[in-house]
Image (cartoon, rainbow, N blue to C red):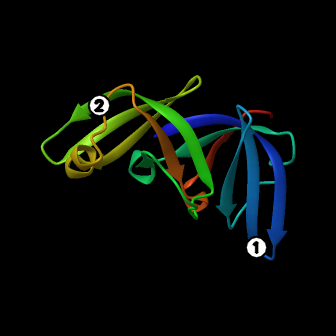
Amino acid sequence: MSYIIATVRDIKACESLHVVEFVVHGETLAMMSLALSDAIMIGTRVKLAVKPTHIAIAKNLTGELSYSNQLPCKIDAIENGSLLSAVKLGYFDVMLESIITRTSLERMQLEVGDEVIALIKASELSIYEVLDV
């Protein structure tokens, strides 16, 4: 799991669906949720979680994407297996890990030091822990 400390910026609700916006290092992240704890309110600090298999990587990105969460990162390390690669992405003080196929890594010619965009769908982000209790 990768974890991000963020602050709740806005909460929108329609019936049982919630879209929660967070701010971290000046960037806005969004999360979709069907259930939301009463402890979550504007200004609450939380630890967000995302699975490494749910973080996509873009290099030389142009155009628009439906990914709500797009974080500019730098590749800090790459661990290659025979089929998969674990790519460690530095985002300020946060270390994100993306698991991608080795074929994608080679096709994109990803290397340590490359500047990339970490892409996370709003449906793949979750609140792991409420820090302000």
**Is 22 left or right of 77, judged from the image as shown?**
right
Q: Amino acid at mark 2?
A: Ile
Q: Camera-side residue: 55 or 72?
A: 72
In this rendering, the count of numbered labels is 2
Residue under numbered circle 2: 78
Q: Mark 1 vs mark 2: which is more N-terminal?
A: 1
**In which quadrant is the C terminus drawn?**
top right
Residue 39 visible from this viewpoint: no
Residue 12 placement (x, y as % from top left): 83, 63
Residue under numbered circle 1: 16
Residue 108 placement (x, y as % from top left): 30, 46
Look at discs 1 and 2 and give the one toward the viewer.
2
Estimate how packed mark 2 is, as few (under 14), some (14 to 19) or many (20 or more) residues with alpha carbons within 10 Å. Answer: some
**Is 48 left or right of 86, judged from the image as shown?**
right
Asked which secondary structure carries label 1, the reply is loop
The residue that appears at 56% across and 62% down in the rendered structure is 65
Asked which secondary structure carries label 2, the reply is strand
Which residue is the extreme one toward the bottom? 15
Tell me the distance, in whole angstroms, between the alpha carbons under discs 1 and 2.
Answer: 40 Å
Residue 87 visible from this viewpoint: yes
Residue 122 placement (x, y as % from top left): 61, 58
Residue 34 placement (x, y as % from top left): 68, 67
Q: Amino acid at mark 1?
A: Ser
Q: Which mark is residue 104?
A: none
The residue that appears at 58% across and 48% down in the rendered structure is 70
**In which quadrant is the N terminus drawn?**
top left
Q: Camera-side residue: 107 or 20?
A: 107
